[in-house]
Image (cartoon, rainbow, N blue to C red):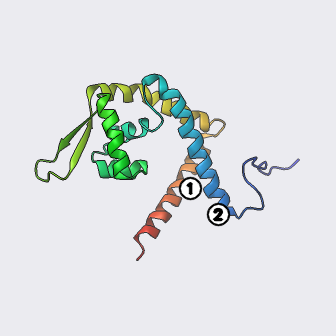
Amino acid sequence: MSDSIPKSPVSDPAEEPHRAVGRLIKLTLNSLVRAVDQRVQPLGLTAMQWQPLLMLSKGVDTVAMLAREVEVNCGAMTRMLDRLEEKQLVRRRRNATDRRVVHLELTERGRTVVEEMMPIVNDELQRHLRGFTAQETATLIRYLERIVQNGAQQDQMP
C-alpha cells in the first residue's frame, strides 16, 4: 500500500504542473461561487450580487475598487449597483472634495442581508475544506498567499 496522494479526477497527469495548479484553483473558485450562488437565492440575491455586498462589508467603498475586487469592468459594476440600490441594499454618495468619486455603503437592509449571507459563505468554505486538518488548511493558505504575492511582484515589474 502506498502513502502517495490519490490521483485527482479533475487533473490530467500529462498536463504541465503549473497549468494543473491554475486549472484546479479556477475549478475550486467556480465550485465555491456556484454553491454560494444557489444558497443566497432565497435572500433575493442573484448570482453576481452577493460578491459586491461581501466586498462592501469588508471596507471596499468605491465603484472602481469594487469592480477590481469582483473582476468586472466599471460599467458592469455600475449596472449591478443600480440593481442593488433598487433593492435598497446599497447607497451611493459623491465625495465632497472630488465629485468624480462615488463612495458606496451598505444600507441597514444591506447590512442585514450580509449578516444572513455570511454563515452561508462560511459554511460553503468549510464544506470545501472538509477533511482538511487545521495544519493542512494553514499550509494551503500559506501556499495560496505565496502565489498571490508572486503575482503581485510580477504586476510591479516594468
Q: Quadrant of the C terminus?
A: bottom left
Q: Nearer the viewer, residue 23 or 154?
A: 23
Q: Residue furthest top?
A: 42
Packing grade of label 2 (10 A; few <14, some 14-19, many >=20) is few
Q: Is residue 83 visible?
A: yes
* Disc with the residue nearer the chain's start (2 vs 1): 2
Reply above or below: 120 against 34.
above
Q: Nearer the viewer, residue 46 or 131?
A: 46
Pointer 2 residue? 18
Q: Nearer the viewer, mark 2 or mark 1?
A: 2
What's the residue at 22%, 44% (across, down)? 103
Q: Is residue 58 visible?
A: no
Packing grade of label 1 (10 A; few <14, some 14-19, many >=20) is few
Q: Secondary structure under badge 1?
A: helix
In the rendered structure, the answer to whether residue 87 lies left or right of residue 50 reads left
Pointer 1 residue? 143
Name which residue type carries label 2. Answer: His
Could you tell me how many numbered marks the image carries? 2
